[in-house]
Amino acid sequence: MGTEEQRLAPLREKIDALDAAMLDLLTQRAKAAQEVGHVKGGFSSPVFRPERERQVVARLQEINEGPLLPDGIAAIWREVMSACRALEARQTIAYLGPAGTFSEQAAQTFFGHSISGLACTSIDEVFKSVEKGAAQFGVVPVENSSEGAISRTLDLLLDSPMHISGEVVLPIHHHLLTKSGSLEGVTTVCAHAQALAQCQQWLSEHTPQLQRQAVSSNAEAARLAASDPTLAAIAGEPAQETYGLQAVAVQIHDDPHNRTRFVIVGNYECQSTGKDQTSLVLSVDNQPGAVHRLLAPLAKHGVSMNRFESRPARKGTWEYHFYIDIAGHADDPKVVQALEELKETAAFYKNLGSYPHSA
């Protein structure tokens, strides 16, 4: 039978040969991508097209015979395309910083790691960075599965001229972190207000003695905890690794299925892929049955509604804006018909963008 090393040696040689063959193919792919970039440059076409990359991954997942899982295929090709895209032009992506936030993780999940990240101190700054051209796209949280909508993001989407170009949903795992890995000498736990809310039951049961302090982000909490032994932070693995913290307790979020949805904002308008979503902001006059009449065109034309969120219109008149996600692209025939009728019914109408649906 031979020793373990003797049996592994030919398999390792086979893997080395395959790696070399794969590198050769990746080199050929990179050169082809450069040629595509030269052609696109002559027509001033955008470097990054989310819908095109989504189609590439979907096709490969469809023809994949295993044993790689679909998520593995997506992760591998996302990085391949990111590296090839960077040969054409490295994209600058703005996100809610500092380094180690879930927003940075969402940016890397969507664009791959071959990007230049621009850490911003607030969601407002993310929008401004893209609007001013300091970044090509921005990544902002829009809703959490347990705490609901991120109101500031909704307000900025309403006022900004930018479009939603994509979305990414991340599982959110919160850990209680300190510099030492214990709570000895710790008096305060800090985190983003949303994270404190998502962990409030666990904190009340296990650390009732700790004061709770809201800060701008979980990564900022981790940064503070790394230099102050009286502070504990609630954050995820990226922040833990970035700031060299130790876990006191892991996965302390109250909802085991805790997830946050992020949207990609920019000036790019996606074309139809056949698996899209369109986000709208609508309002109606304050009349009986007005909301029912507003949504009637969706049912009439067979357009499904994936999300419905109301938000005060900030006019002091008890009026509301309705943030709605519908299935389909704004150019799809049945969606076109539904939206035309919505425009006639709504007192206010804004299409935030059509983009590939992550689900």
Image: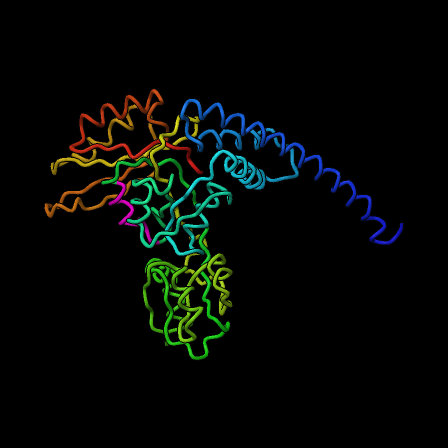
Quarter of the C terminus within the rendering: top left
Q: Nearer the viewer, residue 205 or 115?
A: 115
Regarding residue 321, the answer to whether it shows in the image is yes
Identify whether 46 is placed above or below 248. Answer: above
Magenta region's main secondary structure?
helix
Q: Is residue 296 left or right of residue 141?
A: left
Q: Position of residue 9 (x, y in %)?
A: 82, 47
Q: Is residue 11 left or right of residue 338?
A: right
Identify whether 211 is placed above or below 303. Answer: below
Please check the rendered image and state whether residue 153 is part of the magenta-colored stretch, yes or no.
yes
Q: Nearer the viewer, residue 327 or 81?
A: 81
Q: Position of residue 13 (x, y in %)?
A: 79, 43
Q: Residue at x 29, y 46 (%)?
A: 153
Q: Nearer the viewer, residue 122 or 28?
A: 28
Residue range in magenta is: 147-157
Q: Position of residue 35 (x, y in %)?
A: 54, 26
Tell me where residue 351 sits by quadrant: top left
Q: Residue furthest bottom?
A: 185
Please check the rendered image and state whether residue 199 is part of the magenta-colored stretch, yes or no.
no
Q: Residue at x 43, y 75 (%)?
A: 229
Q: Position of residue 185 (x, y in %)?
A: 43, 79
Q: Residue at x 43, y 52 (%)?
A: 102
